[in-house]
């Protein structure tokens, strides 16, 4: 299940979930730089954690969550929601902008 990654907590949570659930696999979405920074020095099962790199991030301070979803087509949130829509993943978890998640789920999924 993909995560929109903008902070340390989602990556840590993903790694913890992998440890606790041996049948789980996770796809992290986000910028390469952010994901590499958060995963530096951490150990994890590389067969169960994969990445889809994006170039944009929907910030919590977005003026309009709907416009953020429409404008930021290569954001971790939009890419992850489209993966749900296309049945590439089973679910989506985000610690990001709640309004954008709701808007994206409604508009994209």
Image (cartoon, grey):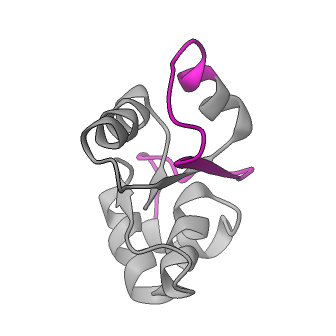
Return the residue found at the far top: 41
Q: Position of residue 109 (x, y in %)?
A: 45, 87
Residue 81, placed above or below residue 14: below
Is any atom of residue 1 visible in this view? yes
Q: To which quarter of the image does residue 100 belong?
A: bottom left
Please give the name of the residue rendered at 30% of the width and 42% of the height, measured from the top-left corner. 17
Is any atom of residue 68 visible in this view? no
Residue 76, placed above or below residue 90: above
Return the residue found at the far front: 22
Please give the name of the residue rendered at 45% of the width and 76% of the height, measured from the top-left corner. 104
Magenta span has 62?
Answer: yes
What range is drawn magenta here? 37-64
Q: To which quarter of the image does residue 74 belong?
A: bottom right
Disc tally is 0
Please give the name of the residue rendered at 55% of the width and 71% of the height, measured from the top-left corner. 69
Q: Position of residue 35 (x, y in %)?
A: 61, 33
Return the residue found at the far left: 20
Left or right placement of residue 32 versus residue 47 in this view: right
Q: Position of residue 70 (x, y in %)?
A: 61, 76
**What secondary structure prevails in the magenta region?**
loop
Residue 20, placed above or below residue 73: above
Please give the name of the residue rendered at 57% of the width and 68% of the height, measured from the top-left corner. 78
Magenta span has 74?
Answer: no
Left or right placement of residue 88 versus residue 91 in this view: right
Q: To which quarter of the image does residue 99 belong?
A: bottom left
Q: Position of residue 1 (x, y in %)?
A: 43, 62
């Amino acid at each position: 299940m993909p995560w929109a990654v903008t902070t340390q907590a989602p990556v840590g949570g993903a790694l913890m979930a992998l440890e606790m659930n041996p049948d789980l696999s996770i796809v992290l979405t986000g910028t390469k730089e952010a994901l590499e920074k958060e995963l530096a020095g951490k150990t994890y099962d590389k067969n169960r954690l994969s990445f889809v790199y994006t170039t944009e991030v929907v910030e919590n301070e977005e003026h309009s969550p709907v416009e953020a979803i429409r404008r930021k087509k290569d954001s971790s949130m939009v890419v992850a929601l489209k993966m749900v829509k296309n049945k590439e993943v089973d679910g989506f978890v985000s610690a990001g902008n709640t309004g954008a998640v709701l808007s994206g789920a409604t508009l994209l999924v």
